[in-house]
Amino acid sequence: MASERIWTAGLLIIGNEILSGRIQDRNVAPIATWLNLQGIRLTEVRVVPDVEARIVEAVRALAADNDYLFTTGGIGPTHDDITVDAVAAALGVGVEVHPRARAMLEAHYASRGGLTEARLRMARVPAGAELIENSLSGAPGIRCGNIFMLAGVPHIAAQMLEALGGALEGGRPLMSLTIGCWVPESEVADLLAATERAHPGCQIGSYPFFREGKVGANFVIRSAEEAALEACGADLVLRLEEAGRAAVPGGI
Amino acid sequence: MASERIWTAGLLIIGNEILSGRIQDRNVAPIATWLNLQGIRLTEVRVVPDVEARIVEAVRALAADNDYLFTTGGIGPTHDDITVDAVAAALGVGVEVHPRARAMLEAHYASRGGLTEARLRMARVPAGAELIENSLSGAPGIRCGNIFMLAGVPHIAAQMLEALGGALEGGRPLMSLTIGCWVPESEVADLLAATERAHPGCQIGSYPFFREGKVGANFVIRSAEEAALEACGADLVLRLEEAGRAAVPGGI
């Protein structure tokens, strides 16, 4: 088989609140899962503070290394919302008010005191950018080439992703298959490595746990090819059974 | 006042399982909180896959930019546990078996089938490294200069941190004070920016929410100086009240 193009994405989480430990991030896992459904692999996540120079540096690095870059946070109306300015600076373009974003905000705030200068901040985009629709708040997400700026609030970010579903070119999603086993992972480490070596194109991750007073592990096999995945899974079950261990398809 | 030294840390999360969305990270927030208690500020988090070159690159970048570097994940016995090799490669040192780690593992596995080659992997450390005690599993964490390698399993990582409490030099912890308000943040954006400008050394973050059918926001003020923090908080409460908005000390 010819080698296929693999599409990748980086994710930049912008927010002092994550770095201070005040709140726990809840965007990485859903964005990672959504990307995989689009056939795009998340290759790196960075969390940086609300400091323009730090955002600019991370945007440049992650955009250079990946097909797509997603950001969360910093697109609201307050002084600590500086994502648009930082992305524009990273790209070397200006910032402009997007006419349709302005119209959306005007409609949204018509019955809420009108469009103040602070609220108008949410219509600012890097020059040439498009909007990502969002019915939950008046403020849209922003797409600037292959950079996608989402809200920091998880349910709003999720809605922006929904609006993007099917719009991004990707490859084949990485599929996975999980096999659980009540065994200390150290006891089957050689077996796992040998199984992985025997199945090119498959990766096996080992995730140990301690539950119900016993140790066990889930072995997650990943591959972009279903046949290879199934063959690797069947082989792992067999090898575990030969070692006297019962495998639990689907995981424990 | 003379400017004080600020101590910083980077955090590197090693694990395909976070990037695939399979599991949600639960290490960042507790490590961030613990670091702040030591007077160390977390300035960046990166999540990278179980690929040696990617880990090496991130270790070098984060170690160069910070006083301390913490890693989580990849220190177990299986083939996908490559953190020790990657850190050694980043530092340009060899890998050796630590005699005390070997002894600890021998004791731990004496009644569990003995010390196999896979299990012995958990005694491997970058040359010259020390151990971080851990009574929960037989495998210790590893300290190599200012790089601290912790387990990926959150409760084991937490115990390794506990063992390090008070051992790392830091500065003054960043303190915070939260004030809540049932107001759309866009309505008080100018007020927040003006308050921050009036209190050098203080930063104000605005975290909007939608709850009980109403919009509101928590304003988190951060400073290393208690007096400045208190003054900024009192000023913000006053300004909100002058704008006809009731402030809720402690947040909503």
Image (cartoon, coloured by chain):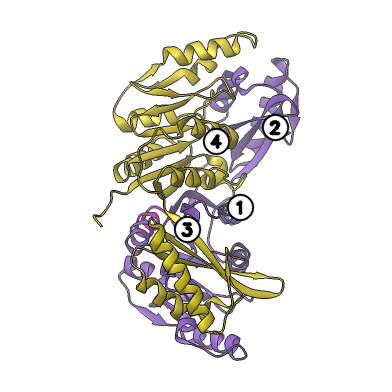
Chain colours: A yellow, B purple
Q: Which residues are magenta?
A: B59-68
Please, which chain is the residue tagged with disc 2 on?
Answer: B
Q: Name the image quarter holding residue B135.
A: bottom right
Q: Which residue is mark 4?
A: A158
Residue B252 spot, x, y in % from top left: 73, 33
Residue B41 spot, x, y in % from top left: 52, 50
User: Does residue A187 appear anywhere in the picture?
Assistant: no
Q: Are marks 2 and 4 on the same chain?
A: no
- In the rendered structure, which disc, 1 or 2, sits on the residue that comes first in sequence? 1
Amino acid on which the number 3 mark rests in the picture:
Ser
Q: Which residue is mark 2?
A: B179
Q: Is residue B65 one of those drawn in magenta?
A: yes
Q: Secondary structure at mark 2?
A: strand
Neighbours of disc 4 within 10 Å: few (<14), some (14-19), many (20+) = some
Distance from Cα at disc 1 to Cα at disc 3: 34 Å
Please, which chain is the residue tagged with disc 4 on?
Answer: A
Q: Is residue B189 above or below residue B61?
A: above
Q: Secondary structure at mark 3?
A: strand
Neighbours of disc 1 within 10 Å: few (<14), some (14-19), many (20+) = some
